[in-house]
Image (cartoon, grey):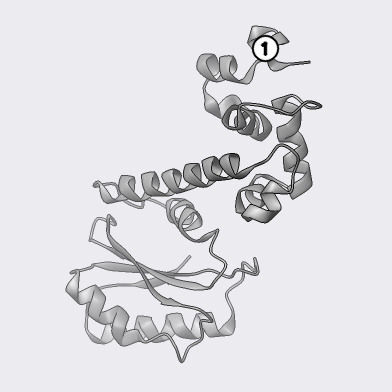
Amino acid sequence: MKIMEWPAQERPRERLLKHGAETLSDAELLAIFLRTGTKTHNVVDLSRHLLKEFGGLRQLLEANLKEFTHQPGMGDAKFCQLQASLELSKRYLQQSLQQNQSFSSPDDVKSFLSSLLSRHKREQFVVLFLNNQHQLLVQETLFQGTINSSEVHPRVVVEKALSYHAAAVILAHNHPSGCLEPSPSDRHITDRIRQALQLVETGSPAGRY
């Protein structure tokens, strides 16, 4: 059955307008974005199929062009739409934090870093420089590629912190493999940078989220 043949109160768009986007399932939100289904599936059923095939929303959004367009009804245009929506979300979050909003909890930091790092296929070492109210001054990717203790230079982090007059520093490093636990090398890097910052008395507690 086509979506337009559904009762109005069951259609994703109408439900969003009446009750808000947060009340919709992943499949319903995806259906609104995809707009059209295929000859054999309405757009909600197609969305459910895609989520099942990829294993969830995150895996779907992280799929590359070849993987995405291999699915029936999914072409370059829909791939571009989804990628553009991801980039808009990331920029919105970054600008919101830069406009006098502060990190009030580890969850705020996690959300920001997830949007920033989740889709990178290469390792990234990112530093967030904050003022004394925990507002984001600058976010920089200082090192890329295979990250180990010999390639991350505490001096660079210290120089940046001083140049931005940062009162706090947050270190972040993604694992493209999906591993969430910090490695011994990660902990070693963090300790070295914390010690370097303490030596120059920046008042910047280096942390890793």
Tell me which residue sits at (43%, 83%) in the image: 191
Residue 4 visible in the current orientation: yes
Name the quarter where the N terminus is drawn: top right
Tell me which residue sits at (48%, 44%) in the image: 84
Residue 63 visible in the current orientation: no
Q: Position of residue 25 (x, y in %)?
A: 65, 30
Relative vertical location of residue 198 with respect to residue 28 in this rendering, above or below: below
Relative vertical location of residue 132 with respect to residue 10 in this rendering, above or below: below
Quarter occupied by residue 202: bottom left
Label 1: which residue? 4
Taking 32 as reference, is 108 left or right? Answer: left
Q: Position of residue 79 (x, y in %)?
A: 59, 45
Relative vertical location of residue 205 with respect to residue 116 in this rendering, above or below: below
Frontmost residue, 95 versus 5 = 5
Q: Position of residue 140 (x, y in %)?
A: 34, 67
The kind of residue on which mark 1 rests is: Met
Quarter occupied by residue 132: bottom left
Tell me which residue sits at (38%, 48%) in the image: 91
Q: How many marks?
A: 1
